[in-house]
Amino acid sequence: MTRVAMLSVHACPLAKLGGRDSGGMNVYVRELARDLGARGIEVDVFTRWRERYDPRIQQLGPNARVIHVESGPIGYWPKMAVYEHLDQFGEKLLEHVAAEGKRYDLVHAHYWLSAKVARTLAEHWRVPRIQMFHTLGLVKREVLDEDIDGESDVRVAIEREAVRESAAIVAASTIELAELRQLYRADPSRVAVIPCGVDPEVFKPVRQADAREALGRDQCERLVLFVGRIEQIKGIDVLLRALGLLFQRHPDLRSDVCLLVVGGALDPGDDAPETEKILELRRLVHEHRMEANVAFVGSRDQEQLALYYAAADVCAVPSLTESFGLVALEAMACGTPVVGTRVGGLQTLIEDGESGLLVPAGDDTALAEAIHAVLTDHRLRTHLSHGARERAERFTWSRVGQRMTELYDKVLAAAAGGRGAQPPDRVEV
Ligand code: UDP
């Protein structure tokens, strides 16, 4: 049986989603680990102990566990603070593994923070490492004018090292592959493009009227939805400006259209109280006199989210950059048309005019026009809804698991062929 040490240092697969630093990567690691476990691959996901009452070890499914590793105090920490404690994380992880007497065949790391620990572990255990970045520092640097997290240089250095040294890299789209080649000089023969998945049991069409009633939103005539972490990179301010424009150009819509913003922690008792970003967005709502149209709902679990997607006429994904865009895929699986930006994985997921609409990132006018088209053109909405569902069927976690298993096999076969070689063998993927 293949044993994988999966590293997701700052993103626990069991975390509450939509709050600070908890989103697509948590979902990805959870679903991938579960699928691999069901295939008979033993997966231990090592993650930082963030929630006080979480047990040290939690079962994710057959053959798949989450192991919380102490490093620094419990609670939410900004990423650079997590970075400061990575050595401790690695030491504690090794202690835990030694105490259990376990051996792993490979290390699979998610995000740059995990890449640093993966390097230490792969050297220590003399096993190959696989890296997935989820987002790349240099891509983020291109779209954000300030280095909000103060992470940029150290992050990029770690990413470059991981690109050079990993046996294989997983990219979520061909766009990410191109970014890895151009910005990080990655060797394309070592990059496997494996798009993300969606759970069709959770995200499936529900009658719009039923979903609205279940959510108590039946008073809303036309519903625009945003789902995601409340961060600048998600482009929510562009969406609010687009809505302002929409109302300016079509005043009749002001009494008809609601925007629900799902994500972020709004409960003051929560680990992440209402953030600066939400306050800033509320000011924008006020400027455009849209208080009656826009509601910040806070985070919702995925079962609830499925109802939000089904209730919506259109799901806006106005991200400035997006390595894949699970929210878009989930909405599509529910048959909800998506208006997304022509960035990253969104442009490979959505076929413009067929399974959604694409607009340039940061362009509030184009976004307003696309939302207007979907809201007012019934035929277009129906066409996009069918196209979206059809397209989404191709993206399942089971397919991700199968492709990952094939990648593991190749990496392990290459490493076995060159046993003893240092650094671990690389593989053509
Ligand atoms: N999500 C959630 N509840 C929320 C907000 C988001 O469960 O309140 C989930 C959503 O279903 C999706 C993920 O968080 O699976 C966000 O993934 P995406 O790839 O869109 O963005 P990322 O967080 O990776 O930037």
Image (cartoon, grey):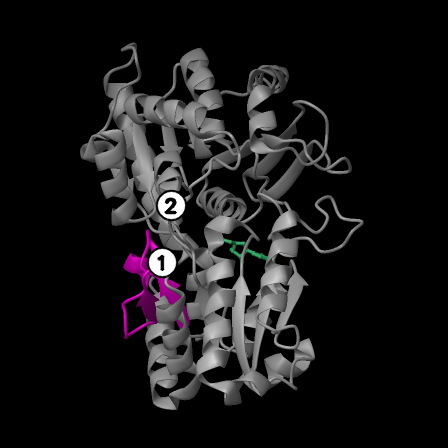
For the residues bearing labels 2 and 1, Cβ distance under 8 angstroms: yes
**CA–CA distance between discs 2 and 1?**
10 Å
Q: Position of residue 41 (x, y in %)?
A: 45, 37
Q: Secondary structure at mark 2?
A: helix
Name, please, the residue furthest toward the right.
269
Q: Residue at x 56, y 44 (%)?
A: 62
Vertical placement of residue 130 versus 204, above or below? above
Vertical placement of residue 383 versus 77, above or below? below
Quadrant containing the C terminus in the rendered view: top left
Q: Position of residue 387 (x, y in %)?
A: 32, 75
Q: Residue at x 41, y 13 (%)?
A: 123
Q: Does the magenta segment cover residue 240?
A: no
Q: Residue at x 76, y 48 (%)?
A: 270
**Amino acid type, callout 2:** Val
Q: Does the magenta segment cover residue 349?
A: yes
Q: Secondary structure at mark 1?
A: loop
Q: Position of residue 312 (x, y in %)?
A: 53, 76
Q: Which residue position is annotated with label 2? A: 143
Q: Residue at x 34, y 84 (%)?
A: 380
Q: Which residue position is annotated with label 1? A: 361
**Amino acid type, callout 1:** Ala
Q: Which residues are magenta?
A: 338-361
Tell me if I can see residue 331 in this picture.
yes
